Image (cartoon, coloured by chain):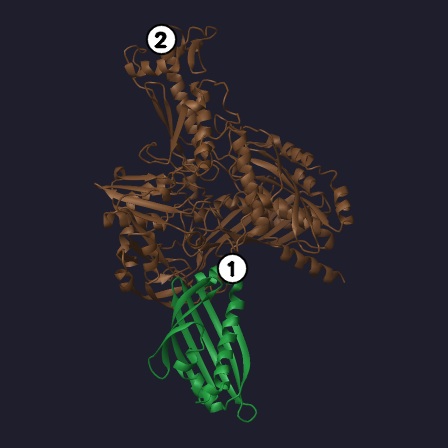
Chain colours: A brown, B green
Amino acid sequence: MTTATPSTYIGARTPRKEDPRLIRGSGVFTDDVTLPGMVYVSLVRSPHAHARIRRIDAAAARKEPGVVTVVTGKDAEATGVLPVFITVPGMNGSKHMPLASDRARYAGDAIAAVVADTHKAAKRAADMVTIDYEPLPVVVDATKALEPGAPILHEELGTNLVFTYPVKGGDIDKAFRDAEATVKLHIVNQRLIPNAMEPRSVVAKFEAGELTVWSSTQIPHFVQLILSVNLGLSQNKVRVIAPEVGGGFGSKLQVYAEELLIAHLAKTLGRPVKWTEDRREAYLATIHGRDLVEDVEVAAKRDGTILGVRIRTVANVGAYLQAFAPGIPTILHAFIIPGAYRIPAFDCEVRGAYTNTTPVDAYRGAGRPEATFAIERAMDRLADEIGMDPAELRRKNFVPPDAFPFTTISGITYDSGDYGPALDRALAMADYKGFEKRRAEAKARGKHRGIGLSSYVEICGLAPSKANSALGVGWGGYESARIRVHPTGAVQVFTGTSPHGQGHETSWAQIAADAIGVSPDDIEVRHGDTFESPGMGVGTFGSRSLAVGGIAVHNAAQKIREKVIQIGAHLLEASPADVVVEGGKVFVKGVPEKAKAFGEISMAAYLASNLPDGMEPGLEATTYYDPPNFTFPFGTHVAEVEVDPETGTIEIIRYSACDDCGRQINPMIVEGQLHGGITQGIGQALYETAVYDANGQLLSGSMMEYHVPTAADVPPFALDHTVTLTKTNPLGVKGIGEAGTIASTPAVVNAVIDALSPLGIKHIDMPLTAEKVWQAIRKAGEARR
Amino acid sequence: MHFEGTADIGAPRERVWEFVTDAQRVSRCGPDVQRVDVIDATHFKVVARAGVGAIRTTFALDVVFTELRAPEHAAVRARGHAPGSALEMTNTLDLADAAPGRTTLRWASEVTVSGMIASVGARLMQGAADKVTQQVFACIKEQLDSPAART
């Protein structure tokens, strides 16, 4: 039974509990963990993108002062292979060892590990490991990797093709036969580098048969599971701790080579071991994101009704398949391409390819930004083609509010939605109606002004375990929570999700506080330690924490609430139906002066001498929550830009967004997520790109060559929201972690293309750097002469 | 990266040939050369410091004359590594008589840099490599032009 709870704390702009310690610098990150007798690892990485390893000579390195050992692939086979958690049909998997022993497949592939008494000694000795490479032909472009004669990365597969993934629905041939208008786009969704503020770090110690690993990870439970299985240790003897984690954006959603290797070294050397990557290493050896090439075709009627969408995609997975890589361009991309629209025919095929580049996996939005970019750019092109207002074209094709739950042509069921009001609000905030006047005014100043929008739907709350299984995800999509009320009334919440900046300590406390009637200040949320949390947690990714993990906390809190009511009613000699839980007290409705304090109830639960008949002593609850469906947040973002034709520079003048993530637990955290997300999406639109040369060298190998936007690069964001509750979970929450990143990229690019469309410019590939824009303007000018 | 150029040298062809195919002497024209070990007539090892801007490292290079057609054409391949970086270079040299006592040296160089230097210094690489190559051939010219080299 679920008792309706009043919302005192849910919905409040509660200041983040974690901020004071983070701002003061007293948070403990993995690299802060230093243990007696610790040794340090430096990894020797291949400078070649593709090379046979003929010989490794570590003799000189071993003689260096302070060096404990040098380990190569052959010495470290006991680590086992790196796991891949998703299998799509017909997939050609790659064997991925923490240290490559026969062949390096990307510049940055680790070949040897040097262990020394100090970090400096390890680094110095790593420079002395001599490796005799035989360079091999290199392929960095995914399309070229699939052509006959391309260098093959994994000889045992005989091909670079990882998978061919079709998603189809309706009669696509008929759609194009009946079309009165068609548009085609070739989109390069460029490769990005995640750039978490805290680079990865792993510390491991092995004592008395027990392995403890600190790691900067989004998924401590998976790391624990794989370490236990791969290293042959009983799972109760493996403890993984994710302390403070300084951002991840999907890049720490892995069981990495270094986690296996450092744990293996701690186990074999019997000394604590630390490895922390530097930023350059992070650029090479931490996963990248995106890197899709898409050909999109849309068939429509002249009145704007969409008849069908055909899309062919080639996804670059890099040199090896990482943990979730097979699911990103497929499950999280192909299914959501229809977006907010009712599309009667859909034909999608995604091919994945191995290349001599850093492996690609989930990066904030993971598949959904690419899908949204494709459909939202196509909508603008169609609007241009048929001479219709882009906002009206979207509105015309929106899934109507009475159609929910709505099953898309790709076969997924949207829980709830009402796309029109979010569009209307965003347009009103942006003064869309008054735009043409501003465009004319800018033109008089010699500037090109444009406005662009994107209306997105995303898949969040990953996910129902049965759906996961059907899609090839090798693990359930539930989440766990445990609430422990101590005899004195102190409350601890243990969560299976492990945050890396999302503020779970605050939001989870708000959720639990409402249910059990105490202040969030009196609730401690603990996370990231597999010895504390329930048996299995899944982790923080895919905007799932709140819609799955938050619900687990809510459900556990409801169990506590029920027991508190039962005990309270018993002590007050009243009926449970008449009892109120509020303000840290339990009392009979209307008689607050005769209350039992929360601490008295908890003490009674443990004294156990005066409990209702048959009640177990104690006040503790553990839950696992498996949602019945994904959630589908949505919204519309509008960007307004000015382009300087003399320099090609773009200024975002105004940015308005109306998002709907269902109920908001903490609007301040929601806005924070949007601020960061929108900024990251603008980074893709305007600044960021990972560049490889033909030899597979990462030319954008540091922040000198890769611009991550800061507050100085973005305008103030005007944010509003609508609230369409989901029926998928009892709180009606959907998730907001990735929405900003998904929506802002197409909104900004659409605005820039709108600004330049009077010049006849239809498309510029991202990032829209000043140089590219300037060149496009020049070319357009020449074409018109 | 491809570089090429010509140098007009104030010395007869045979002497230029002798110089550019002498590992010890020609290596001294390399940037920051620390050591040259001659293995045999066509193989030698060079240790030199190179880099881009502040990113400098020590390369150990294996150098091989892959073609020698005296006194007109030579090809040299250098392969080397440095901590986290690798370098491969093929150079061709063609000599022709110019005015009496003078030689035209036509050179071309194909350079591939991998690893840290390629990745961090990419933006500056072309300019830096061009500069190094220019310096090498300017040095060759200077050595042969100068009276000291004639002894």
Badge 1 marks a residue whose secondary structure is helix
Q: Position of residue A412 (x, y in %)?
A: 51, 39
The structure residue drawn at horizontal position 30% and vertical position 58%, both measured from the top left corner, is A73
Task: Name the image quarter holding residue A417.
Answer: top right
Location of mark 2 (residue): A571
Q: Dot 2, how many residues are within 10 Å of its Cα: few (below 14), some (14-19), or many (20+)?
A: some
Residue A537 lies left or right of residue A752; in this view the side is left
Number of numbered discs on residues: 2
Residue B14, can we see it? yes
Q: Position of residue A556 (x, y in %)?
A: 39, 25
Residue A495, can we see it? no
Chain under callout 2: A
Badge 2 marks a residue whose secondary structure is helix
The Cα atoms of the two marked residues, 1 and 2, are separated by 72 Å
Q: Dot 1, how many residues are within 10 Å of its Cα: few (below 14), some (14-19), or many (20+)?
A: many
Q: Nearer the viewer, residue A465 or A528?
A: A528
Q: Quadrant of the N terminus of chain A?
A: top left
Q: Position of residue A676 (x, y in %)?
A: 54, 40
Name the N-terminal-most of marks 1 and 2: 1
Q: Amino acid at mark 1?
A: Thr
Location of mark 1 (residue): A143
Chain under callout 1: A
